[in-house]
Amino acid sequence: MSLIAGPGQVSMLERAFDILFESSALKCLNSSIHDFVSKKELHQAFKWEVSEDEYLLFSSALNSHFRSRWLAIKKKHKHAGVNSNVNVPKPETLETIQEETELTEVVNQPCSTLVMEWAHQRLPLPMHWILSAVCSTEDPKGTFSVSANYNIDVSRAGLIFLLGLEAISAAPCLHTPLVWKMHALSVSIRSSMDLLQEDRSKDIFHALQELYGQHMNRLCEKYNRSQYIKKDKCVGTATLDEEKQINSLDFLRFQEKIHGSYTTFVESLVEQFAAVSYGDAIFGRQVAIYLHRRVEPTVRLAAWNALSNAYVLELLPPLDKCIGDTQGYLEPLEDDERILESYAKSWTSGVLDKAGQRDSMAFTLAKHHLSGFVFQCSTSGKTLQNKLVKSLLRCYAQKRHHEAMLKSLVLQGVAHDSQSSTELDRRFEILKEACENSSLLTEVQRLQTSLGQ
């Protein structure tokens, strides 16, 4: 439908929506979900069922939502038609789904009949249109003027519909970039925890996280394979769509693909997580995805700083409970100076203390990347290396309870074999070289003694 429906074809889409969102179609999708979830090992067997009344409710809610969202006549902006050459500043509110992106590009171009006809429509449908129901809990502009309960019903139906489409082969949503799917899940819980407070929606949300985590793992594997120009029958070759996503290391490019001010969205999501989640594991997994190494550095930095400033790093789940494979968060080693300095700041300020005690992925992440940079960095990173070492040692001198944390950082990645003593000696030499006075050298010697070196 994204390809064939254009201006003047609203009635065709209305008929298509009537068929697509019929209750019998939703029943077929739901029956596919249970087998799919079990086969893909996305979740324990679902123990819930959907009643006949709920099928009718969801059918009506989805049909109404997609008609309102994508087929309704777009309202004319107040500034439109006054002076098309004036650059009007964009609103600060972050659009959840940007269906108008392509249209804004032709505002200052000479008008044609086709452009005039498209001016009040949202057609053709964008690639991510299928995700809009999941995001309906958030309507910052009051676009749809409906009750909060209705929006929740649409989102609940949208989750079932989305997982159902993922469960069947050649589904339209499979062509939607992973970055949009991850964003849609985040949007659905940014303003309200309602979806995660209902068992069925929570189960489906978790299953989608697992499914997209598996997709993310495959992209990571294909990227790693492509780096060595190898072909592996187990991994397979990337599709054309996947090749576009793995052309860059940062294939979760939220700021580039979703919105230039995406850091603002992440900060508000963290604010919601800190305020109402009470450490909900599924919410924590969704927030933690923004610390994945395939996410842009600016977004990762914004997520970390927001979590650190809100003192909720300890509420993130353990690394092995996060979305996707653990290596996706750990490799390659962090080389962004701003992020490394933020890790060190959280460490020395004590914000990471509870994170270490609770086995939060935040502590694992900071320890891994700080240790990797300090003990494996190149000569070009010597200045920052010395700065980080001195900061960590001063903190160690002032906070004796940080001894276990610093010891674990020094021991990070050291194999327990005959070569371990040699590697530890090398690491302590690096620490000593960074010391600018005898007091810091004393702290290094004390740490070395505590490790039996």
Image: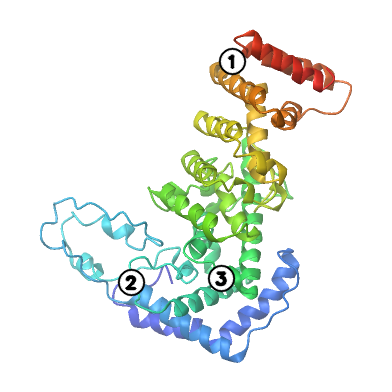
Evaluate whether residue 225 shows in this view: no
Residue at mark 1? 379
Residues at marks 1 and 2, CA–CA distance in whole angstroms: 55 Å
Residue at mark 3? 195
Residues at marks 2 and 3, CA–CA distance in whole angstroms: 21 Å
Q: Say the numbered circle drawn on residue 76.
A: none
Residues at marks 1 and 3, CA–CA distance in whole angstroms: 50 Å
In percent of width and height, residue 90 lies at: 26, 53
SS type, badge 3? helix
Q: Earlier in the sequence, mark 2 or mark 3?
A: 2
Q: Earlier in the sequence, mark 1 or mark 2?
A: 2
Q: Quadrant of residue 49?
A: bottom right
SS type, badge 2? loop
**Mark 1 vs mark 3: in front:** 3
**Observer-nearest of 75 and 302:** 302
Q: Residue at x 75, y 72 (%)?
A: 45
Three-letter amino acid code at the position of disc 2: Thr
Left or right of 276 on screen, residue 232: right
Vertically, is 407 above or below 49? above
Left or right of 254 on screen, residue 363: right
Three-letter amino acid code at the position of disc 1: Thr
Q: Residue at x 51, y 52 (%)?
A: 270
Evaluate whether residue 42 shows in this view: yes
Count every numbered label the image shows and give the total: 3
Q: Say the numbered circle drawn on residue 143.
A: 2
